[in-house]
Image (spheres, rainbow, N blue to C red):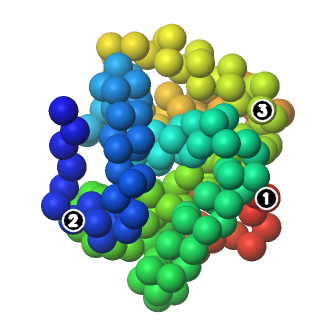
């Protein structure tokens, strides 16, 4: 059974994108459960799951499909929906149901940030990191701080974690993003 807010169409305009995202929660959201009381909960619950959905698209349809998704869905939605003066840093999101800006910070900016971390880590380290998190946190609460520890563990000399921390508090979308 898939449950979602009645405001979901405001955040993810294409209904065809809902099901893969919601099915992904069987892994990140249910088996690996976010700590609902921890700071960064929405990023852990929704952004990671949304980026894993994007990776599924990449695996199924090829690398170009991921690049299109990053640019034509996440980046386009974010830049068209979020006005500069209303931008919300990921770490300031209280709930994805409060505003379209908070929802876009999680559902659009979040996957873009995760892609930057993946590019920094390299595909092999990124995949090992995600698999290890899944193994280590099955049926346990998972937090943003846990995620940061794994980025530090699988990243390069603290560079990836440093970049991740910067992007979590940044406003807008960095023009230096690599797709």
Please determine whether, in this image, residue 81 is positioned above or below residue 158. below
Q: Quadrant of residue 71?
A: bottom right
Q: Residues within 10 Å of mark 1 (few under 14, many from 20)?
A: few
Of residue 2 and residue 83, the one placed in the foreground of this image is 2
Numbered mark located on residue 123 in the image: 3
Provide the secondary structure element on which disc 1 rests: loop
Q: Is residue 55 visible?
A: no
Which quadrant is the C terminus positioned in?
bottom right
Q: Position of residue 149 (x, y in %)?
A: 59, 28
Instruction: Identify the image quadrant of residue 168.
Output: bottom right
Residue at the location (59% across, 43% down)? Answer: 57
Task: Indicate the secondary structure of the residue bearing disc 2.
Answer: loop
Q: Residue at x 61, y 58 (%)?
A: 69
Residue at screen point 34% across, 26% down: 26
Percent across and percent down for residue 25 are 35, 33
Return the disc, 3 or 1, that comes first in the chain's sequence: 3
Mark 3 burial class by Cα count in 10 Å: few <14, some 14-19, many 20+: few
| Circles 2 and 3: CB atoms closer than 8 Å | no
Side (left or right) of 57 relative to 16? right
In this picture, is 117 found above or below 129?
below
Measured in 3D between alpha carbons, the distance from the residue under mark 2 to the one under mark 3, in whole angstroms, is 34 Å
Taking the image as shown, residue 3 lies to the left or right of residue 49, namely: left
Quarter occupied by residue 174: bottom right
Labels in figure, total: 3
- Residue 51 screen position, x and y as percent: 55, 44
Residue denoted by label 2 = 7
In whole angstroms, how far apart are the C-alphas of marks 1 and 2? Answer: 30 Å
Look at mark 1 in the image and give the residue it sits on. Answer: 178
Name which of mark 1 and mark 2 comes first in the sequence. Answer: 2
Which residue is nearer to you in this view: 101 or 150? Answer: 101
In the image, is 162 to the left or to the right of 6?
right
């Amino acid at each position: 059974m898939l449950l979602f807010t009645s405001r979901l169409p405001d955040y993810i305009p294409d209904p065809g994108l809902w099901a893969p995202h919601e099915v992904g929660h069987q892994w990140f959201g249910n088996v690996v459960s976010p700590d609902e009381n921890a700071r960064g909960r929405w990023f852990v619950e929704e952004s990671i799951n949304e980026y894993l959905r994007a990776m599924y698209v990449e695996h199924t349809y090829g690398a170009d499909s991921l690049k299109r998704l990053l640019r034509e869905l996440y980046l386009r939605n974010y830049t068209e929906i979020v006005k500069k003066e209303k931008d919300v840093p990921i770490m300031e999101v209280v709930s994805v149901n409060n505003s379209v800006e908070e929802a876009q910070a999680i559902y659009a900016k979040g996957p873009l940030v995760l892609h930057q971390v993946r590019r920094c880590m390299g595909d092999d380290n990124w995949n090992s990191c995600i698999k290890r998190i899944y193994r280590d946190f099955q049926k346990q609460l998972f937090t943003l701080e846990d995620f940061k520890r794994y980025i530090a563990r699988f990243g390069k000399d603290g560079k990836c974690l440093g970049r991740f921390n910067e992007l979590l508090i940044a406003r807008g979308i960095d023009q230096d993003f690599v797709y």
